[in-house]
Amino acid sequence: MAEPSAAEPILALPGQVLDQISEVLAKVGIDLAPLVLQLFLLAIVVAMFIPTWKKLRAREKSDRVPLYAAIALGLVGIGILVGVVENATTPGRVVGSVRSERLVDVRVVLVDFRDREISRDAGRVDTGTGRFALHYAPLVDGRARKLRIVAPGCKPQDLDLSRAALRAESEITWEHVCAPA
Amino acid sequence: MRAGLILLLAAGATASALPGRAGAQALSGTVVAGGSGRGDVSVVAEADGRPVAQLKTEPDGRFKVDFSPHPKARDFTVTFSLAGFRKDVRLLDRSTLDRPLQVTLVPTTGPAAIPPEDEQKLKSLVTSVGTGPLLFVPYNLPAGAGQPDAASLNERLRVQLQRLIVTHVQIAATSTEARDISLTKASVDAGNDLARLRAVGQFVNALAVVSGIGFGVGDGVSAPKEIELASSFVIIPQGEWFDPPLLSIVDTVPSDQVGRAALDQKMSRMWGRATILALASRDLKGVQALKGPERKTQLQKIQRYLIAERANVGAADELGAAKLKELVEIVSRELGR
């Protein structure tokens, strides 16, 4: 898999903050898809930015609070947009192959940061070669965090997916050994 | 030693490769179950994870899936299922859509199915696809065969056959490839049933399965002095373009010795050649997952050992010559794609 670049932690920051907000909201019963949340937050930022901008234009030169508020809101808005662009440009395809004793029983899925299944495929692997191709919508569902392999009678096993690996569409190879559930 | 050779059969029908067709929009093929084309097999198709079609095969096993509503899709998953058979899943890309697909379903019930107790025995032999061994299912021998018993005769058969095969394969393939070949014993009762042998081979992802049945030659009262061995060689990996032959040989050997010299020379050639065909069938299948230089290198390797083997084919082995010629043509075509 590709090594993460130095810029990745910075680019990842808005996404991580968004994930945490989503998680908190989900805990209180507001379960929103990442894109919906991003648009919702962006709408709030824009709504707050308009009066702040008016105050900024009407302010006394010595009053710097509206300026700081406008800068803060601008940064938050840019962060949200970076998150949207980040998700929109992440490939929605994860490919690889599984080596397993029983390919016919194996199923692979992509899960998000909330541990929810986000791949739209049935998740079956080629019973002859073990190859699989999973598809999802990163713009709507956010970036896939893990590849999960499930098989009857076995504990589910997870493989972390790095942002760099997803971007590079790296081929994943997985030797699956069943750990009894 | 008296050796009679009967080459029984049987080239499976060979699906010829069609010329490449850019941007294929449909997949067609045949589903075989229980030895013949089978209707009512459920076919579920996805394109990039989106449902495309859910249909049943025609009475003769044929099916056709139209992917034209998804012209930009890259991955096509087709799942074949039928009660009493293992599910078969194929992941295809657009470049392989234009080739007729032949799917052979492995039974889970019925006479060809593997009983649960045999499944337990086979589990330790299961390998990843593309790395499977040659499987030796002990011959069903008559009472009184072998010294001191049938089990020891079977073991001598296994060892001698392995030597014959490895020696032959070394001539065409590299020593490394030949060294990787072992004739692994699977102590299951396949009853010399070819469908069961195939099911066992598919279960462990074997390269091929060797087995047979022995008939005592004698007065029927005392222990047989000679045994007529009817041996079968079932190649397991099958490709979309190549259906490997099913080979059988009948040979008569003394019941108390199955030394290397006692096995007919033609058996050496037949089984060795059959192993080369099995290697090619397996490697060609593996090539489908490769791209670029790696694919080319692998195809050249297959071409090399096929051509080397073809150079050793005598006029008597028409089937072997035909199958090798066919494989060489497939590889050349693939190299030119």
Image (spheres, rainbow, N blue to C red):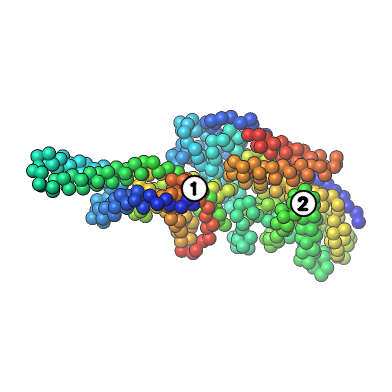
| Location of residue A1 in the rendering, given as x and y in whole percent from the top left corner | 49, 52
Q: Seen from this angle, which residue lies furthest bottom?
A: B148
Q: Amino acid at mark 2?
A: Val
In the picture, measured across the screen, residue A92 lies left or right of residue B256, that is left
> What chain letter is assigned to the residue under label 2?
B
Q: Mark 2 and mark 1 in contact (Cβ < 8 Å)? A: no
Q: Are marks 1 and 2 on the same chain?
A: no
Q: Seen from this angle, which residue lies furthest front?
A: A62
Q: Which mark is residue B282?
A: none
Instruction: Count residues near mark 2 (Cα–Cα under 10 Å), then give few for <14, some for 14-19, many for 20+.
Output: many
Location of the C terminus of chain B (image quadrant): top right
Q: In this rendering, is residue B272 above or below B62?
A: below
Q: Quadrant of residue A100?
A: bottom right
The secondary element bearing badge 1 is classed as loop
Location of the N terminus of chain B (image quadrant): bottom right
| Location of residue B236 in the rendering, given as x and y in whole percent from the top left corner | 67, 49
In the picture, measured across the screen, residue A166 lies left or right of residue B317, that is left
| Location of residue B297 in the rendering, given as x and y in whole percent from the top left corner | 66, 44
The secondary element bearing badge 2 is classed as helix
Q: Amino acid at mark 1?
A: Ser
Instruction: Count residues near mark 1 (Cα–Cα under 10 Å), then give few for <14, some for 14-19, many for 20+.
Output: some
Rounded to the nearest angstrom, the CA distance separating label 1 from label 2 is 36 Å
Q: Which mark is residue A170?
A: 1
Residue at 70 percent of width and 48 percent of height: B279
Residue at 24 percent of width and 46 percent of height: A75
Q: Nearer the viewer, residue B44 or B192?
A: B44
| Residue located beneath label 2 in the image | B169
Q: Quadrant of residue B311?
A: top right
Q: Nearer the viewer, residue B232 or A72?
A: A72
Q: Nearer the viewer, residue B68 or A83?
A: A83
